[in-house]
Image (cartoon, rainbow, N blue to C red):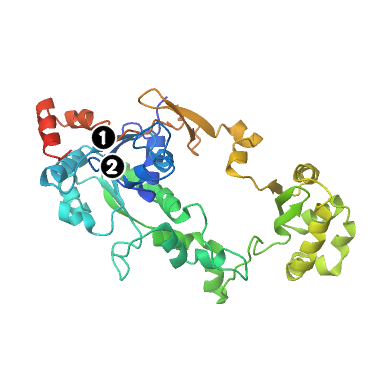
Amino acid sequence: MTGILAGVRVLDLTRVASGPWCTQLLADMGASVIKVERPGTGDDSRGFRPSVEGVEGLSAFFLALNRGKQSITIDISTAEGSALVRELARECDILVENYKANTLVKYGLDYESVCAVAPDIIYCSITGFGQTGPSAQRPAYDSILQATAGHMSLCGDPDGEPQRTAVNVADLTTGYCAAVGVLGALIHRMRTGEGQFVDAAMLDVSLALTAQYASGYLTSGEVPLRAGNRAPNTFPSGVFTAADGTMILVCGNDRQFRALAGRIGRPDLADDDRFADNRRRRENHEALTEILNGALAAKSIAQWSALFEEVGVPSAAINDIDQVFSDPQVVHRGLRIEVEQDDGRLLPMVRSPLNFSRTPAANGPTPGLGAHTDAVLRTLGRSDAEISALRDAGVI
């Protein structure tokens, strides 16, 4: 079987997170992704911690975002290097980059310059704040976007400080949206023969992710406040304490609350005026939390989970990462895999989240720095002598 994007070639000028996540998704779907890295050092994320034990120039971070790609090293700041990249662009369908807006103009690798030699190319530029405007040149890190787009104002305890999410949601969701944009542009090109520019900005995606919070403000003028682990619209919904630790409980409607009350031996709670409907449960959440924690202390998380599952009350243990990989459903889904690398080494990874019945995701190896430089340059007609001369000159 071949992937959905088999035969599609992607020139990857991305680094660290948002861009590599986008191009990894394309590689998962079978595209041939050529990642251009700096000679000697490569993508900054190769040096992040923790590193993969026994593998030089490979971090856990890089491993998670660059599977299935080829790595070539080119110094794009040199005239010869930028010319090589333009030459590669002519052979590719898609180019993805995540430099700060207008950075690549000086190297002749901006959209207009590349489009001049590859008119039908799909060129995706991922930036923090977009191509123009007062913030276009601001450095963009995930935390900066979480703060700017309002995420941090929504995370954390009501009386505590604003908090960011541990997962790089601004980076990774922008990578997802960039991939969606690229695929849409690819369909358009299939229909019309036209390439185009795809503008993917972390600010746009991060604000869109606030979804109902932004919509609520725009329609009512009400500014949402932090509620800790409590869901904004339902209660009980949040973290509660069992005999052996904390767990998540979610009651999305009155039926589930009545079932919960019965299971903990307090059916009277469902008829208590303070808790008769969702609005009143939210208004009296402190009193209800105290009652629930007192009842839940009688049994373990596993015991409660089994009891709640019988009556359709959603609950879950709050897993540490090591516990995640022993979760029966995670095991059943085969989310932990081992991927054979180019050197024959097997490395554990989380498999692609993309699931297709006819064209399964590739889950390919993660490349060593510059491992494919010579092979890719040979496809451009470069001889071994020419490749050696480029390497001696520091171009590759």
Q: Residue at x 19, y 50 (%)?
A: 109
Residue topped by disc 1: 370
Q: Is 252 drawn above or below residue 215 in the view shown?
A: above
Q: Quadrant of the C terminus?
A: top left
Q: Secondary structure at mark 1?
A: loop
Q: Nearer the viewer, residue 291 or 82?
A: 291
Q: Residue at x 74, y 71 (%)?
A: 283
Residue 207's spot in the image, x, y percent? 46, 63
Q: Quadrant of the N terminus?
A: top left
Amino acid at the residue labelled 2: Gly
Q: State the image quarter where residue 377 is shown.
A: top left
Q: Secondary structure at mark 2?
A: loop
Q: Mark 1 packing: few (<14 Cα in 10 Å), some, or many (20+)?
A: many
In the picture as drawn, the residue positioned furthest to the top comes out as 344
Q: Is residue 161 visible?
A: yes
Amino acid at the residue labelled 1: Gly
Residue topped by disc 2: 42
Q: Is 362 drawn above or below residue 229 in the view shown?
A: above
In the picture as drawn, the residue positioned furthest to the front comes out as 54
Residue 8's spot in the image, x, y percent? 31, 35
Q: Residue at x 31, y 44 (%)?
A: 43
Q: Is 343 drawn above or below residue 88 in the view shown?
A: above
Taking 186 as reference, is 301 left or right? right
Taking 297 as reference, is 197 left or right? left
Q: Are marks 1 and 2 in contact (CB under 8 Å)?
A: yes
Residue 238's spot in the image, x, y percent? 69, 57
Q: Cα distance, mark 1 to mark 2? A: 8 Å
Q: How many marks?
A: 2
Residue 372's spot in the image, x, y percent? 26, 31
Taking 54 as reference, is 227 left or right? right
Mark sitting earlier along the chain (1/2): 2
